Image: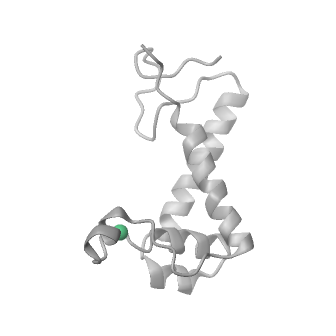
Amino acid sequence: MNKPLPFFPVALAAWLACAAQAVLGIPEGLVLCPFRLVTGHRCPGCGMGHAVVHAMRGNWAESLRHHPIGIALLAVWTGWLLLEASRYFFGAAFAPGFASGRGTSSNVASRP
Ligand SMILES: [Zn+2]
């Protein structure tokens, strides 16, 4: 059976994609929400990507205008990435996700 992909590389890649948009600019008219693409209506998470990118730019008001928890998400996301990177640096394996049961061998991906 294949090992699951550790969550850290996926979360880091998504963070870097947001950072690239913060530097290079957000593509106009870009809609990635599958619910909105299918129904044309906004879901509760719509605007989160723009909110995170504006928060990365330090544009707090614009971030809040797009989604009220974008700033908090960026803070938790960045903190979690830094914590996981430091754990990995000191020899721990990547946890499979945010709510991992650390220390149990059944849900912690092994380090190569
Ligand atoms: Zn949506």
93 w.r.t. 27: above or below: above
Residue 54, can we see it?
yes
- Horizontal and vertical percent position of residue 46: 38, 72
In the image: residue 87, left or right of residue 11 = right
Q: Which residue is depicted at the point 47% across and 31% down? A: 96
7, above or below 105, in the image: below
Front-most of 2 and 85? 2
Q: Quadrant of ligand 1?
A: bottom left
Between 15 and 72, the residue placed more toward the observer is 15
> Whole-percent x and y of residue 99?
40, 38
Expressed as whole percent of the image width and height from the top left, the position of residue 97 reads 46, 37
> For the point 48% across and 22% down, which residue is it?
108
Q: Residue furthest front?
A: 38
Residue occupying the point 73% across, 72% down: 24
Q: Quadrant of residue 84 in the image?
A: top right
**Res 44 seen here:** no
Tally of numbered tags: 0
Q: Residue 85, percent across and down?
A: 67, 38
Q: Which quadrant of the rendered structure holds the C terminus?
A: top right
| Colour setting | one colour
